[in-house]
Amino acid sequence: MTGTGKHPRRSPSLRVAIVGGGIVGHVLGRILVENRHRITAVVSRSTASARRCGRFLSCRNWSTTVDAIPQETRYVMITAPHGAVQDVARALARRDGFSWRGVAVCHASGMLTAAALAPLHDLGAATFSFHPLQTFPRDFAPRLIVPSARGIVYGVDGDAVGERRARVLARALDGHVLHVPPEMRAFYHAACVVASNHLTTMLGILTAFSHDIAPERKDALRMFLPILQATLHNVVVTSPARALTGPVARGGADTLARHFEAILKHAPALIPYYARMTLETIRLAMDKQTLSHDQVNELTRLALSYLDQPLQPEESL
Ligand SMILES: NC(=O)c1ccc[n+]([C@@H]2O[C@H](COP(=O)([O-])OP(=O)(O)OC[C@H]3O[C@@H](n4cnc5c(N)ncnc54)[C@H](OP(=O)(O)O)[C@@H]3O)[C@@H](O)[C@H]2O)c1
């Protein structure tokens, strides 16, 4: 009851089965539980992962077979690895006496579309892809990742009913859907890789720089935290071009030449990376319109001269 005496509007509790007791199954399942939805079954490949995930989701009905999924289930979330999704869909479709009418089935793969669930669609299930646009590192305890998985976007495709059911499931997880046309799926997934994996790689490179600059500091990367955070903020509130500062944006070819010499001395394997990123930064600075034609040419020539340098075998990764 509210103070006005009216009943608050609350969406009915969803009944969801999870197939795949890994990190994504743990985290998304836990948000559903915390949001008062019900996990009807946890199915996984091994007894150990099914039991672990079942316990984390307060679900006693854990199993290694999809036959454990009860008919009352309205959503089946396949959070098994990418390569197992179609096998799981086929195993579900083989179930005897299970009615798929009114049941929605989705998978969490970034690369696969709703077509991976075709056998279930043919049996009358609503099907959709449901890719959480977030990173779920397996080495982290699931409870530590749960907060970062609230309010995220889910990359979705499916038929009209499937997309409607996807919106309901996303709301139950405090998230939103982004329709990704099937022909754009690989491009969308590549963008996710840039956002997370490439950023992680860039931070790995920064870690190597930090160790050389301040070897005595165990937390050397933390020196860069304020500049990293401010950069992210500035890009998000304006645009990459407007947030760009530094030698490329100023046309500082002399500074960059000295950078290349220093990197050649301390971390020669990183020369191609620095040269390629300089070329991309020149492109961004051109959008910003701070460089003259001559400056663009001078910076480009410099970066290309290092990009073309053959690496010694021990420098290549
Ligand atoms: N990790 C991420 O950052 C991330 C982000 C977005 C989307 N995704 C997608 O989410 C899905 C799950 O990823 P994840 O990182 O959670 O993988 P994961 O940690 O490797 O977990 C996969 C789970 O599925 C189980 N499994 C394997 N084959 C199965 C089968 N045939 N039937 C039932 N369960 C099976 C595994 O069981 P065992 O442990 O017993 O082998 C494991 O518990 C993948 O499609 C992935 O592409 C992942």
Image: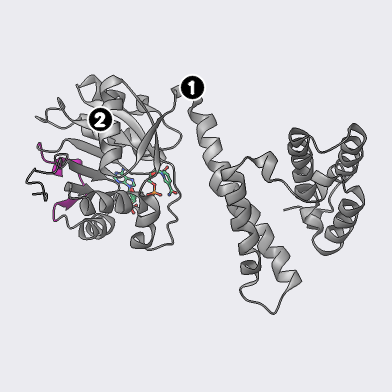
Q: Which residue is mark 1?
A: 183
Residue topped by disc 2: 165
* Rendered location of residue 262, percent (x, y): 86, 61
Any atom of ligand 1 within 8 Å of the CB at mark 1?
no
> Which stretch appears magenta?
60-71
Q: Residue at x 67, y 45 (%)?
A: 243
Q: In this rendering, would 107 be left or right of 56?
A: right
Please rate how many residues cluster around mark 2, counting C-alpha atoms within 10 Å: few if below 14, some from 14 to 19, many from 20.
Answer: many
Coordinates of residue 246 in the picture (x, y in percent): 78, 51
Sequence order check: which comes first, mark 2 or mark 1?
2
Using the image, tell me which numbered label, if any, was put on residue 200. none
Q: In the shown orientation, is residue 139 left or right of residue 302?
A: left
Where's residue 168, x and y in %? 25, 34
**Residue at the extreme bottom:** 216
Q: Secondary structure at mark 2?
A: helix
Residue at 35% from the left image edge and 49% from the top image edge: 150
Which residue is situated farthest in the front direction here? 4
Q: In front: 166, or 316? A: 166
Secondary structure under badge 1?
helix
Q: Nearer the viewer, residue 107 or 87?
A: 107
Q: Quadrant of residue 288?
A: top right
Residue 80 sits in quarter: top left
Q: Residue at x 21, y 52 (%)?
A: 33
